[in-house]
Amino acid sequence: MLGSPISIPARRKMERPMKTIHLALAFFATASMACAEVPVLKVLTYDSFAAEWGPGPAIEKGFEATCACDLQYVIAGDGAAVLARLKLEGTTSDTDVVVGLDTSLTENASKTNLFAPHGLTLANDLPVPFSDPDFIPFDWGWFAFVYDKTKLASPPKSFKELAASNLKIVIEDPRSSTPGLGLLMWVKAAYPTDSATIWHDLADNIVTVTPSWDQAYGLFLKGEADMVLSYTTSPAYHLIAEKDDTKAAAPFEEGHYMQVEVAGLLASSHHPDLARTFLTYLGSDAAQTTLPTTNWMYPAKTPTAGLPKGFETLIKPMKSLLFSPSEAEANRQSAVEEWQTALAR
Amino acid sequence: MANSARPLAPGAWALSSGLAALVLGTALVLALHADTFTLRPAEWAALTFTLKQAALSAILSTLIAIPVARALARRQFPGQAAMIVLMGAPFLLPVVVAVIGILSVYGRNGIVNQLLGLIGLPPFSIFGLHGVVLTNVFFDLPLATRMILNGWFAIPAERFRLAETLNLGPSGIRRHLEYPMLREVLPGALTVVFLLCLTSFVVSLTFGGGPKATTLELAIYQALRFDFDLGRAALLAGMQFLICAIAVTVAGRLTLPANLGSGHDRPQTIRIPGRKPLILDTFFIVATALFLILPLTMVLKDGLPALPGLSAALWQSALRSLLMALTSASIATAGALALTLATARNAQGSRLIEIAAMLPMAASGLVLGTGLFVLIHPFVPPESLALPVTVLVNAALALPFLYRLILPEARALHLTYDCLCTTLNLRGISKMRLITLPRLARPLGLGAGIAAALSMGDLGVIALFAGDHNATLPLMIQRLAGAYRMQDAAAAALLLVVLSFALFWACDQGGRRAAP
């Protein structure tokens, strides 16, 4: 318990093996009693991961088939809500594994000292080298502006072209949404010294700023803007799930900032070995295969069968941008203030 | 009056203390867990914008609501009853759904811009302060109209007939009947709309067009989600409570009981001669109907195609939401009735109870949820209490609306019937059954309907507590939209709207049937 002064809540006792049951009685034990002795692995994640259409159900089924355990999801709204919940719970959390933080949150998450080193070496195919003692990546994507090919014939090729155009874009608020924060990091990584000018020039292109990704994307689909900040993989959803090939992501010359989604193990976990087995499973071929068409992101390790058909149509940025978690955390406050000032005019 | 010095019932004190403890206590919990208390310049800008948009929206909504309510009160036309019920609909829409409806009408490809394009005019942009205010008026004009309309219906028909006998004319009716009634009803309506707009952030941010349009509620969201600054969140929540307390106090000072006396509940017929009033009334009725119906129709159109394909889990969540809404509405109605009956007599301490009853309107859902989470988490897994906590919090959040709706009529009831009841020695359950409940049936029904529908659409506390298997319908909509499934989300939103509206209609209709 990391020397925590807070005692283990009473409910934990129920999870301990029922030592009082004699071997002879065990002979008569019903199936449900047998179930009660199976260790429970609690995985804290964001809601669209655990949703019936997300990767959660398949991963739960796949892992439970081998682990002799019960995997239960605990749900928070999004990546930032996952971290906020962890901080609220502190060392009294009964979560074992956290799935769904991204690299703009991991520095902040590491500083809580709630995470334990995973000690695993899992190969990944990320476009930039990535290794972190506390977190393993499970999927990733490039941020991009998505547009409708039938309405926009020649999309801008850079932030500067976008700023110079009359195109209308809708973006997410970096104060409430991780993609919104990602865009701030993207501009900062592409223009380390000129980011304020870029924002100033982009101001008249921005129709509005929404609190979350789904609202921005909804406005775009409704035709309120020519482009929306999303991912290079967004067109794959329309292509594969809706048989609609009109959406595309615009490649930018400056390169594209990445969102890397990671999972980690809590120091307070009662089943650290089981938790590590789960992290390994999350990086396995079986789990990685489900991610592209459920989370609509790139799997951290390309499955042996390759990516689903349709992903080959997506743009492949030549240059990938990504701050280290500590740079991202150090930049966050000043980047938000710079953005506020530029857009408040 | 002899009984005005009588102390308040202990039950009312207990109930209002409980409300204040829930609302203020959760903010206090955050404050106790905080390390620092600092506000930044951006938060002061947020305060200004919050006040500006809330004040503008409140004034505009109530100003327009007066002629609309008057037209509805003094004219009879086919579909009038349907229109009065419809007035409940926009207010009950989940914000995200309403945003889509508004955009279908006023957005870049919306009806208004298509019409403007046809006659060769430049397009109109909904984004900006005017968009925020327009959307707030869409939400709150109907509510303000209903509150004011109740005031009109509360004027006994005998008073209008007396005015006619005395040949008072329209200006005399205004001066002797309508102005006193408005003086009683308007401050309350203004306060409710102002407080409703105070805690909005989706509307402000989405239509505000950028970080200029930052409200206190968004600042709270940022403090809790990204900065994890509990102290700042508590301070900001405190600012919202202070504004609420000031608004309620000011409105209380401005309210004058009209005391228009009692009647024999004859149907009201207000005869207004002349063409000009008829043209004006027709204009207000048609314009309001269009203003409300167009966006609602677009929500219907968007949602219908995917409705048959919704999953079983979604229907389950709909049933769960329905049951929660009914429970929550019953609790809220009973609580509000107890509080209004206690304060209608203007006994000592009424103002304090009134502030406590209105406080939940200024409560930030996120602060409430986070505070409760911190309190509950050490003892039981929060998801195991998700449903009871949500039901209780929703009841508390809906209580101010009920309180506001019932209070003017509870006051009138007290002024006109209490002496009679005392003379007849009518008290306790008999008084409740024979006098109080029938006389208050109309606002009780409307209030219960609003409480049920609000609870149905709530996304505040449940989002922090829900687990894997106990999601409500609004939460499912958010999850669908968050996974590209905008079609399914639109269909689920339609289902939510239809269910909320059915609940609202049933309660409202029940109340009006039970009224004498």
Image (spheres, coloured by chain):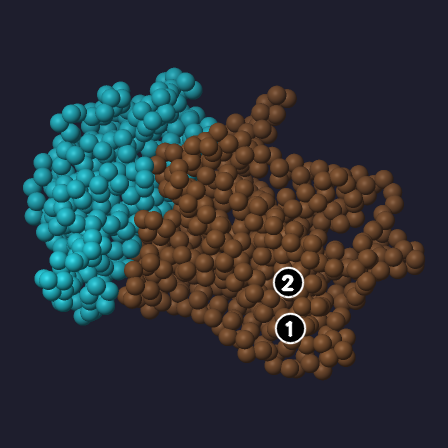
Chain colours: A cyan, B brown
Q: Position of residue B489 (x, y in %)?
A: 43, 37
Residue A113 appears in the picture as rendered:
no
Q: Where is residue A113 in the image (x, y as percent from the top left)?
A: 16, 57
Classify mark 1: helix, strand or loop. Answer: helix
Name the one closer to the observer, B439 or A142.
Answer: B439
Amino acid at dot 2 = Ile
Residue B261 appears in the picture as rendered:
yes
Classify mark 2: helix, strand or loop. Answer: helix
Residue assigned mark 1: B429
Q: Is residue A252 above or below residue A332?
A: above
Rendered residue at 75%/65% (across/down): B258
Mark-to-mark CA distance, 2 and 1: 19 Å
Q: In this view, does A28 lie above or below A152?
A: below
Rendered residue at 81%/43% (across/down): B277
Quarter of the image with the C terminus of chain B in it: bottom right
Q: Which of marks 2 and 1 is nearer the N terminus?
A: 2
Residue assigned mark 2: B406
Rendered residue at 9%/62% (across/down): A23
The quarter of the displayed image where residue B238 is located: bottom left
Q: Where is residue A62 in the image (x, y as percent from the top left)?
A: 19, 39
Mark 2 crowdedness (10 Å alpha carbons): few <14, some 14-19, many ≥20: many
Label ID, residue B14: none
In the displayed structure image, the side of residue B86 where residue B94 appears, left or right: left
Name the chain letter of the residue that bears numbered label 2.
B
Q: Where is residue B347 in the image (x, y as percent from the top left)?
A: 63, 77
In the displayed structure image, the side of residue A227 where residue B357 appears, left or right: right
Rendered residue at 52%/52% (across/down): B454
